[in-house]
Amino acid sequence: MEQKIFENLGVYLINYPNHQKKMDIFGEFYATNPENFDINYGLGLAYYNMGKNEEAKKYLEKAISLKPEHSDANNNLATVYYVMRQYELSLQYFKKAIDIQPDNPNFHRNLSLAYTVLGQPELAQKSVEKAEELEKRKKQ
């Protein structure tokens, strides 16, 4: 029962527009549930949206340690690493997100950004082409 409450709260708060308030609420729950995926994931997203990337990284890494196969958590951690200019780590987590959910065109587009900054334009182009292919399939 408690886990379902956290999941529902997490879904609600992730879309809540006031990032500071969201962070405060998740922080209160974190104090008593530091091993909860939804709380760590929510805190990671809240910190990222506030531009606090070190904190975002900490909570997203914890979330992934709790649910390694969560594709969005891996993609979001990759994005944090990308913003922090840690492109090799970014690439690693974008690839992991794709391994988990290979039909997500956004993940392939994100991967292309990492390839681009790492000086691998051919791989970047292949990732863009894959994203476009997946988007066409979704429209059919």
Image: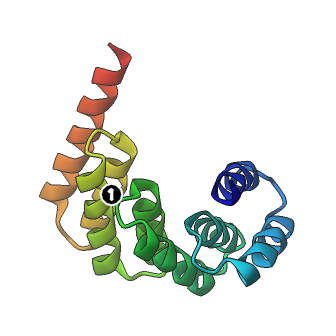
Horizontal side of 31 relative to 3 (left or right) equals: right
Which amino acid, by three-letter code, is at mark 1?
Answer: Ala
Q: Residue lying at the far top in this picture: please name it.
A: 140
Q: Is residue 131 above or below residue 139?
A: below
| Residue 82 seen in render | no
The mark tally for this picture is: 1
Q: Which of 2 and 24 is in front in this view?
A: 2
Q: In this view, does 103 lie above or below 107?
A: above
At 63% from the left and 81% from the top, the residue drawn is: 34
Q: Where is residue 83 in the image (x, y as percent from the top left)?
A: 49, 74
| Residue 62 seen in render | yes
Which of the 4 image quadrants contains residue 17?
bottom right
Horizontal side of 138 relative to 45 (left or right) equals: left
Horizontal side of 61 relative to 89 (left or right) equals: right
Q: Which of 110 and 11 is in front in this view?
A: 11
Q: In this view, does 104 lie above or below 52?
A: above
Disc 1: CA contacts within 10 A as few (<14), some (14-19) or many (>=20): many
Which of the 4 image quadrants contains residue 130?
top left
Horizontal side of 108 relative to 40 (left or right) equals: left
Helix or strand or loop: what does disc 1 sit on? helix
Q: Residue lying at the far left in this picture: please name it.
A: 122
Instruction: Identify the residue under disc 1.
Output: 97
At 41% from the left and 76% from the top, the residue drawn is: 65
Q: Position of residue 94 (x, y in %)?
A: 32, 62
Q: In which quarter of the image is the C terminus?
A: top left
Q: Where is residue 35 in the image (x, y as percent from the top left)?
A: 57, 77
Q: Position of residue 96 (x, y in %)?
A: 27, 62
Which of the 4 image quadrants contains residue 37?
bottom right
Q: Is residue 88 above or below residue 46?
A: below
At 33% from the left and 57% from the top, the residue drawn is: 97
Q: Nearer the viewer, residue 135 or 73?
A: 73
At 23% from the left and 55% from the top, the residue drawn is: 99
